[in-house]
């Protein structure tokens, strides 16, 4: 990994709903990914992880819009690019994989056809050269007997194999950044671990950066170098992966850690955080986590805490450690 930024998001605000009655699903997010870095964005359902990723990819639904912020990819501001230039970057320099490989693959074409189609679009490859490269890509993602598997239809493959094919398609353009949104959630635990291991190996072999989105801190531990914790449309903590597990600073991060099942213990009940993420149209004032937070005081209901430093590359948006004194924003 180098420290040179590849993706740099600042002040991102993404809204949905009609003008005048819109609400922000992502509100003031600053996030960067360095070349060759593995970053995970973690948070419960509804915290704005997917909307952040879709904002980068220029794939926000028509009912939504990016109303503030900048998204720099290398030296290009993606929010200012013409549509055709953005289409070239998406699936090209920035690739993505999603949760459900069965719905992403077309059931009426062989997996080979689908890898070849991606190679034709992004690399201009056709015919025998495209087929040979498709087989190479299947081998790269460790699909056994790629020469045979290339002629299989998606339903002839297991869920894990289908996700490998999706990864092969995503890699066909030799992306600089791979965005993986819950790539292992639909898979059983053993296959999940294999896919995460594969993604990590590929990231190291190919040197691309990976932004992985997950609600699962177990996945974060297996994969990430740096972690971004999101809650209710905002980043509440960001730190190197070990710091997140050893010295979490935000009560929300502590809550997420409390809901990981211990590896070698039988537990009757996981300590999930009580309550749910508020919907974007009903955000509480002040710290958005305060209604669910055991440490909340009056100050927490009044002002939104900014991200404050807690050591090298470690920031959290909580005023608990300041004696509830420092709050701005
Ligand atoms: N097209 C849309 N129209 C209206 N609201 C939306 C739209 N897409 C997302 N939202 C809202 O934005 C908020 C953030 O959603 P997002 O999908 O980013 O959360 P997430 O953290 O990725 O959770 P999940 O893991 O469930 O996808 C949610 O409250 C969601 O309902």
Image (spheres, rainbow, N blue to C red):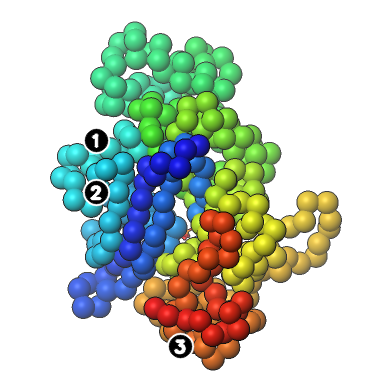
- Helix, strand or loop at mark 1: helix
Query: x and y percent of residue 163 in the render?
Result: 51, 35
Taking the spot 35% from the left edge, 54% from the top edge, the residue there is 9
Query: Which one is closest to the eye, mark 3 or mark 1?
Result: 3
In this rendering, the answer to whether 39 lies above or below 21 is above
Q: Viewed as shown, does residue 98 lie left or right of 127? A: right
Mark 2 or mark 1, which is nearer the start of the sequence? 2
When asked about the image quadrant of residue 291, the answer is bottom right
Q: Please tell me how crowded label 1 is: few (under 14), some (14-19), or many (20+) other residues with Cα within 10 Å.
A: few
- Helix, strand or loop at mark 2: strand
Q: Are marks 3 and 1 in contact (CB under 8 Å)?
A: no
Comparing 298 with 157, the one in front is 298
* Residue identified by numbered label 1: 88
* Residue identified by numbered label 3: 302
Q: Please tell me how crowded label 2 is: few (under 14), some (14-19), or many (20+) other residues with Cα within 10 Å.
A: some
Which image quarter holds the C terminus? bottom left
- Helix, strand or loop at mark 3: helix
Ligand 1 neighbours mark 2 (CB distance < 8 Å): no
* Residue identified by numbered label 2: 77
């Amino acid at each position: 990994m180098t420290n040179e930024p590849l993706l740099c998001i600042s002040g991102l605000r993404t809204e949905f709903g009609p003008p005048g009655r819109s609400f922000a699903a992502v509100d003031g997010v600053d996030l960067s990914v360095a070349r060759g870095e593995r970053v995970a964005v973690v948070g419960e359902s509804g915290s704005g992880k997917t909307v952040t990723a879709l904002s980068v990819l220029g794939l926000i639904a028509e009912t939504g819009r990016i109303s503030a912020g900048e998204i720099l990819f290398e030296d290009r501001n993606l929010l200012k690019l013409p549509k055709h230039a953005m289409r070239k970057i998406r699936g090209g320099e920035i690739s993505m994989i999603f949760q459900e490989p069965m719905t992403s693959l077309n059931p009426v074409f062989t997996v080979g056809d689908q890898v070849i189609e991606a190679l034709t679009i992004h690399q201009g490859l056709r015919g025998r050269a495209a087929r040979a490269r498709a087989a190479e890509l299947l081998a790269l993602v460790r699909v056994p007997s790629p020469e045979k598997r290339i002629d299989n239809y998606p339903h002839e493959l297991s869920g894990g194999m289908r996700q490998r094919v999706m990864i092969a398609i995503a890699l066909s353009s030799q992306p600089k950044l791979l965005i993986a949104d819950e790539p292992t959630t639909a898979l059983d635990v053993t296959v999940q671990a294999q896919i995460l291991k594969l993604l990590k190996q590929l990231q190291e072999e190919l040197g691309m950066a990976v932004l992985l989105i997950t609600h699962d801190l177990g996945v974060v531990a297996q994969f990430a170098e740096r972690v971004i914790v999101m809650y209710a449309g905002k980043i509440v903590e960001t730190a190197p992966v070990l710091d997140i597990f050893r010295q979490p600073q935000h009560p929300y991060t502590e809550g997420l850690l409390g809901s990981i099942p211990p590896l070698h213990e039988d537990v009757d009940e996981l300590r999930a955080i009580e309550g749910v993420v508020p919907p974007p149209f009903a955000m509480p004032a002040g710290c958005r986590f305060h209604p669910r937070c055991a440490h909340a005081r009056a100050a927490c209901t009044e002002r939104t805490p900014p991200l404050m430093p807690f050591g090298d590359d470690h920031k959290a948006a909580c005023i608990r450690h300041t004696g509830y004194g420092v709050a701005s924003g």
